[in-house]
């Protein structure tokens, strides 16, 4: 079992906090960059992608939601993720979820619930785990 593996509910809480805390500022920033609310979806999606890709690299595996919940992304050796790890986790994992029309996302959710190590599909792809921070 992963040391201090974070389960489904706390991970869901962190994702919801990220959505609440980050979505509105990103939408406003996207509107400023794109010149209006009706044109900002691509900009907002790009900013959201960069947030989820880069913040865990620069902030030792945390996003804002994960920090509040006391959990973080970690490589299996305990070190924080780097760029290659986060690209595997977000891009390759996202492609797998998209190619399977979301079926892999459902499988991933079930994996977090039933696996002893609480690792999802994108965690397996990237060699990561989500753990409680000490």
Image (cartoon, rainbow, N blue to C red):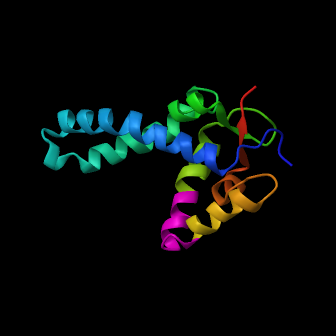
* Residue 45 against residue 61 in the figure, above or below: below
Q: Is residue 11 left or right of residue 116?
A: left
Q: Is residue 125 magenta?
A: no
Q: What's the magenta bit mostly, secondary-structure-wise?
A: helix
Q: How far across and how far down the image is residue 112, in percent?
A: 69, 56
Closer to the camera, 85 or 104?
A: 104
Residue drawn 65% across and 44% down? 85
- How many marks the image carries: the answer is 0
Residue drawn 28% across and 50% down? 42
What is the quadrant of residue 79 in the picture?
top right
Residue drawn 66% across and 60% down? 121
Q: Range of the magenta residues? A: 93-103
Q: How far across and how far down the image is residue 7, in percent?
A: 70, 48
Q: Residue furthest front?
A: 9
Q: Is residue 132 left or right of residue 13?
A: right
Q: How far across and how far down the image is residue 33, in percent?
A: 20, 35
Q: Is residue 96 magenta?
A: yes
Q: How far across and how far down the image is residue 66, in percent?
A: 58, 34
What is the quadrant of residue 80 in the picture?
top right
């Amino acid at each position: 079992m992963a040391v201090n593996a974070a389960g489904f509910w706390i991970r869901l809480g962190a994702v919801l906090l990220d959505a609440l805390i980050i979505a509105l500022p990103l939408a406003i920033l996207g509107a400023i960059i794109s010149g209006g609310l009706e044109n900002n979806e691509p900009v907002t999606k790009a900013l959201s992608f960069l947030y989820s890709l880069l913040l865990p690299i620069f902030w030792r595996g945390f996003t804002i939601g994960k920090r509040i919940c006391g959990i973080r992304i970690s490589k299996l050796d305990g070190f924080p993720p780097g760029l290659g790890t986060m690209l595997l986790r977000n891009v390759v994992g996202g492609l797998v979820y998209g190619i399977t029309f979301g079926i892999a996302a459902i499988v991933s959710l079930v994996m977090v619930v039933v696996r002893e190590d609480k690792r999802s599909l994108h965690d397996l792809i990237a060699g990561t785990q989500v753990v409680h921070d000490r």
